[in-house]
Image (cartoon, rainbow, N blue to C red):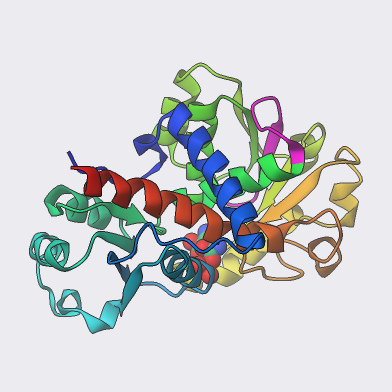
Amino acid sequence: MVRHLQSLQDVSRDELKSLVDRALVLKKERLSGVRHQQLAGRTVGLIFEKPSTRTRVSFESAMYGLGGQVIFLSGRDTQLARSEPLKDMARVMARYVDAMVVRTFGQEVVTELAEYSSVPVINALTDLHHPCQILSDIMTVVEKKGAIEDLKIAWIGDGNNMANSWIQAAGIVGFELILACPEGYDPNGEILAAAQKEGGKPITLLRNPEEAVAEADVINADVWASMGQESEQDERLAVFQSFQINAELMTKAPADAIVLHCLPAHREEEITEEVLESDRCVAFDQAENKMHMHKAILEQLIGEVKKQ
Ligand code: CP
Ligand code: NVA
């Protein structure tokens, strides 16, 4: 059966660990000049209905870096823009490409494409999840701190797609996760309840950022208004003011706590320039790691199809 990556629920604890290990090896090999060709003759289709810098370019360079090739389609380029059914799009694309990487609004778009596609469908961000980002973020944590299992990870701000995927990761891997979100901006309740039931370490939802960072090893920031929420920007700016990651908040965290930001960053909103540009923030290594992790994902999912 073809494997998809719709959310982190599609990945087991062991698979997640081996993706991180493999991405770290691929990073080292690239630095030492190894030329990979394991996906030569393979093609990935990128279908992006929202803007992207990092995810698009890192998936494209990952695929080229493994000897493969890429076809990029923005939302307006396909017949989806003229209401062609997703189930038709999925079956047609699967005859041309070896995997589809999809960025869109509703998670149900990814679900339907996966249901009808005979090649892997990879979620490159929906309103509900951002699984590939969290896989690269875990890689970054492992790279910086050695391992993640015994760490305390803090999430400060909106209970958005990134927060939901961190929650799933905490359930799967079993690390402690402390979220601080303003009331009314909680993460998805079902995803939270399911991960809390998995019985690893605690996953806690708080209202106070200072409490959330007090013992944190890793502090995560993301925009206050995600793509598609532009009309809520002013309202959110007011609600989220006390959730900013700034020098004052960092004094409440352990001295060796690092800051992650998936980028793009809105300076002086969710994070100050001072913290973003400080040594404690690893956002640019985190951005680089997306490419190495995307190689590991493509290699694994396309490799499995090749074996069938
Ligand atoms: N972090 C991330 O997904 O960035 P892009 O929106 O630029 O892809
Ligand atoms: N939560 C953000 C993540 C961007 C990478 C968004 O969905 O816009």
Question: Measured along the vertical axis of the image, is residue 48 above or below residue 17?
Answer: below
* In this picture, residue 218 sits left or right of residue 109: right
**Residue 125 pos. (x, y %):** 41, 58
The residue at the far top in this view is 199
Question: Measured along the vertical axis of the image, is residue 239 above or below residue 203?
Answer: below
* In this picture, residue 252 sits left or right of residue 199: right
Residue at image point 14% right, 63% down? 86
**Where, quadrant-wise, is the N terminus in this rendering?**
top left
Can I make out residue 249 in this image?
A: yes
* In this picture, residue 251 sits left or right of residue 95: right
In front here: 229 or 272? 272
Residue at image point 52% right, 33% down? 17
**Residue 210 pos. (x, y %):** 80, 40
Residue 278: image quadrant is: bottom right
The residue at the far bottom in this view is 77
Residue at image point 47% right, 32% down? 192
In front here: 225 or 256? 256
The residue segment tinted magenta is 145-159
Can I make out residue 128 in this image?
A: no
Residue 77: image quadrant is: bottom left
**Residue 168 pos. (x, y %):** 47, 35
